[in-house]
Image (tube, grey):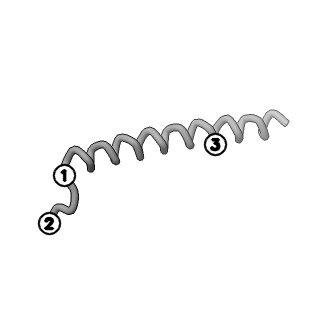
Amino acid sequence: MKLAPTWITEMNVCALRSYLVATRRQFFSFANMFSIR
């Protein structure tokens, strides 16, 4: 039971993965800023 074509799903997975990587990087830079302080 597929609600969306595979290319839309793949695009969403890629976007979600890049978003998670970006937020993780932001979180680590934030944590580094606090740990230096």
Which dot, 3 or 1, sits closer to the camera? 1
Q: Within 10 Å of the Cα at label 3, are there few (<14), some (14-19), or many (20+) other Cα atoms?
A: few
* Kind of residue indicated by mark 3: Phe
CB contact under 8 Å: marks 3 and 2: no
Please identify the residue farthest to the right as the structure is shown: 37
The amino acid pointed to by label 1 is: Pro
**Around disc 2, counting alpha carbons within 10 Å, would you say few (fewer than 14), some (14 to 19), or many (20 or more)?**
few
* Rendered image: mark on residue 27: 3
Count of picture labels? 3
Q: Residue at x 48, y 44 (%)?
A: 20
**From the image, which quarter does the N terminus lie in?**
bottom left
Query: How far from the left and from the top, in percent, is residue 32?
Result: 72, 35
Left or right: where 12 falls relative to 32: left
Q: Position of residue 23 (x, y in %)?
A: 56, 43
The answer for how far apart the CA atoms under marks 3 and 1 are is: 33 Å
Looking at the image, residue 25 sits to the left or right of residue 21; the answer is right
Label 3, secondary structure: give it.
helix
Q: On the image, numbered disc 1 is attached to which residue?
A: 5
36 relative position to 11: left or right: right
Q: Which residue is mark 2?
A: 1
